Image: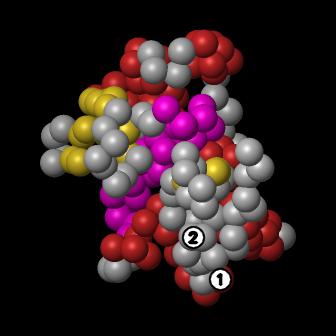
Amino acid sequence: MHKSPIPSGAFGKVSKELLQKCVVLLKKREKREYEAYTVPDDILRALKENIRDEENLKALLCSICGHLGINGDFIKLVVIDELMTDWAGQISTDLAFTTIRLDLRARYTLDTVIAILAHEAIHLHLYYEGIHLKDTWENEVLTDTAAVYCGFGEYIYRGYAVTQGDFALSYNKVGYIRQEDVRYIQELMAMASA
């Protein structure tokens, strides 16, 4: 069966003004520059063999957190596979205890899982740094923008790709920004550092 093309309007578009606002805020408030993040080879190999291995998923989360200067050992990772959730990942924290929930769907690629965990870890990073926007949706866009800003751009780009769904004219996507937005954020960052 031939797959239909993904319509450009299938998922909401983030305004360039909001993306610019997020990059300006991060440039002003972030305390350091970040190199591009790379998943350690041993973790990558292990997860390519079994993406559902919770020990290696926790090692991935700790590696992502370490890139941000956060000790991931104290974060509880809960892996679920619930078709009823409308989220890919979720974080809850009360200053003493942090839990990240990953809804590990069968259709997720390893890049998608990395992007989801990076997004959730960035929520914690932004919380610690006191960087936020008032509107909930704008704050989610800020979180995705910060993930790109903090070195996870290529994983966000690949992990947030729109894919064909299980049914005709159905599509799947995680994240709040699109692949084009990732490239635009990277352009803004390059202009700001030039």
Magenta region? 106-132
- Quarter of the image where the C terminus is located: bottom right
Q: Decide whether residue 101 is among the magenta residues.
A: no
Question: Which of pointers 1 and 2 lies earlier in the amino acid sequence?
Answer: 2
Residue appearing at x 32%, y 32% in the figure: 80
Residue at the far right in the pictured view: 194
Type of amino acid under label 1: Lys
Q: Which mark is residue 11?
A: 2
Residue, disc 1: 16
| Res. 111 visible in picture | yes
Q: Position of residue 79 (x, y in %)?
A: 33, 29
* Mark 1 → mark 2, Cα distance in angstroms: 16 Å
- Quarter of the image where the N terminus is located: top right
Looking at the rendered structure, the secondary structure element under dot 1 is: helix
Pointers 1 and 2 in contact (C-beta within 8 Å): no
Q: Which mark is residue 2?
A: none
